[in-house]
Amino acid sequence: MSLETTFLNHTFKNPLMNASGVHCMTVAELGELAHSQAGAFITKSCTLEKRAGNPEPRYYDVPLGSINSMGLPNLGFSYYLDYALSYEKLHAEKQPLFFSIAGMSAKENLEMLKLIEASDFQGITELNLSCPNVPGKPQLAYDFEATADLLAQVFQVFTKPLGIKLPPYFDFAHFDQMATILNQYPIAYVNSINSIGNGLYIDPKSDTVVIKPKDGFGGLGGEYVKPTALANVRAFYTRLKPEIKIIGTGGIRNGQDAFEHLLCGASMVQIGTELHKEGVAIFERITQELAMIMDEKGYQTIDEFRGKLRVMS
């Protein structure tokens, strides 16, 4: 049996990754991911300049997942690009690094993409259009016209492999609209989903919210979001042209959850909330659980069941 997955002409030992934003802020955390059983890993979504993010407390574990309003804290574009270039130089034989950017404006995104294009970075870039937790900054990917305009500019200046991180959508018409836009461009993959924006969780003992920013409103992750994540993975798998791959993110706590994302059409899967709770040892546990499920079902490779979700006739 093999858990290997081929993605953008690279073969990864398994399809598991961290979700950007979790265990990837510092070089030390990235190093732990590099030495874990994850098949690949991705950097923290960065802005051109260092950001402190929202006031704390801004993350809270809840019974069925998590709520956060981080506000894009990061150590700045140069910090992560320096790490990426150093990683590639020291580990040329290893799998490519995924590098995530999330500019505060279209201009900032284009500036960072131009810097990556001009650099020696040979990995995979992810453009995050779906941060729900920056006060006063709506998610770009909910504005279809603005998204189309940005992508048109992006592919005039950027030629390296590029994926797009998307928020959850809740209407078939929105799946159709976004897929129509994405299918016009040489996008390597879409990553679906980011957290479900602007949830609210109340501490029953104190009758207060559990995070400080935005009066307690924050993005939901974990078990809460898995059905929405699976729906988005499936919706885009069935609408995007075959050369645009899917990374499934949302609610992966065990091997069964990972199996379901792959069954819906994901080529790779990212783990956020549960990685935050459990640490990098989670990758070894979930790969073992996924292998057991595949063995029970008689699958020798992921390609034998990827995308083969059954529907009722």
Image (cartoon, rainbow, N blue to C red):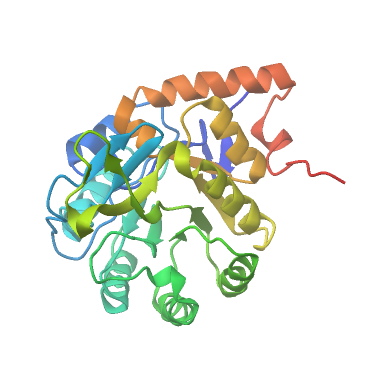
87 vs 195, left or right, is: left
Could you say which is closer to the camera, residue 200 or residue 131? 200
Check the image and report above or below for 113 versus 13: below
Residue at 47% over, 80% down = 152
Residue at 14% over, 64% down = 49
Could you say which is closer to the camera, residue 91 or residue 247? 247
Count of residue discs = 0
| Occupied quadrant, residue 114 | bottom left
> How far across and how far down the image is residue 87, in percent?
27, 42
> How far across and how far down the image is residue 248, in percent?
52, 46
Identify the residue at the far right of this view. 313
Could you say which is closer to the camera, residue 67 or residue 241? 67
> How far across and how far down the image is residue 281, in percent?
35, 22
Could you say which is closer to the camera, residue 144 or residue 101? 144
Check the image and report above or below for 256 versus 132: above
Residue at 42% over, 38% down = 222
Residue at 45% over, 20% down = 285
84 vs 231, left or right, is: left
Q: Looking at the image, can residue 97 be seen?
A: no
Q: Looking at the image, can residue 244 be seen?
A: yes
1 vs 277, left or right, is: right
> How far across and how far down the image is residue 102, in percent?
30, 63
Identify the image quadrant of the N terminus.
top right
95 vs 299, left or right, is: left
